[in-house]
Image (spheres, rainbow, N blue to C red):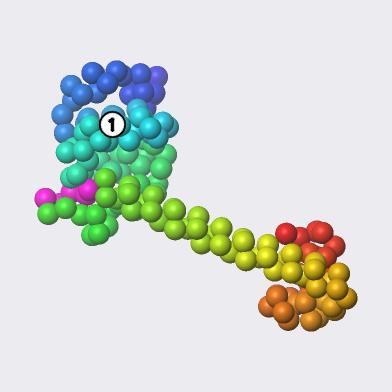
Amino acid sequence: MTVSKGLCRKTDEEICRYTGELRTVFGFRKYADDRKQLDRFIAANQGHFNNVSKTAVNALAELTHSPRLREILTPQYQTKKGGFNMCKGLDGMIQEGVQKGLRDGLQKGILTGKQEMAVSLSAMGMSVEKIAKAAKVSEGIVRGWLSGSAG
């Protein structure tokens, strides 16, 4: 049995017998695949997550196969005690993901709007060249939209 699988089988009571960073690492690993449980565990043990060592953050990144956790190891999340505030770091990572999702969604919406406009203008008899100029895309993209092969 791997260490990681063994940690997942530990009860909350067993995990809470550990102190400091062992509790942080073991609990985080146990609940890494269940966001609601992980949120509850972090909230119940917030004091342990407010000042986590670089070693513990690296261990969590390895045990959870989440190299992005290492993004927490920046001065932005460093505490006065020399550790790292995982609560703030995770919140920052979530916020970055939300912002990226919004940007990606906006870009997709704009592109969809341009494609719909191209189809409408084509139906009105406008040339591919003029449609491309109006949509600020290449003629090849417009041709793909009009043929239904791009989106």
Q: x and y percent of residue 69 in the render? A: 35, 47
Instruction: Name the residue furthest front.
Output: 124
Residue reaching furthest to the right = 125
Residue sitting farthest toward the left: 81
- Is residue 129 within the magenta segment? no
For residue 43, side relative to residue 1 (left or right)? left
Residue type highlighted by circle 1: Phe
Q: Residue at x 30, y 44 (%)?
A: 58
Magenta region:
81-86
Q: Provide residue 100's location: percent of width, then percent of height.
A: 47, 58
Check disc 1 and report its element: helix, strand or loop: helix
Q: Residues within 10 Å of mark 1 (few under 14, many from 20)?
A: some
Quadrant location, the C terminus? bottom right
Residue 85 colored in magenta in the image? yes
Please state, as top left, top right, bottom left or bottom right, where the N terminus lies in the image: top left
* Above/below status of 49 relative to 115: above
Q: To which quarter of the image does residue 138 belong?
A: bottom right
Main SS category, magenta section? loop
Residue for point 79% across, 81% down: 130
Given residues 130 and 144, the one toward you in this image is 130
Q: Does residue 61 appear anywhere in the picture?
A: yes
Is residue 21 visible in the rendered image? The answer is no
46 to the left or right of 104:
left
Q: Residue at x 12, y 54 (%)?
A: 80
Percent position of residue 74, x then y: 27, 57
Q: Disc 1 designates what residue?
A: 41
Q: Nearer the viewer, residue 40 or 56?
A: 40
- Locate residue 135: give its quadrant: bottom right
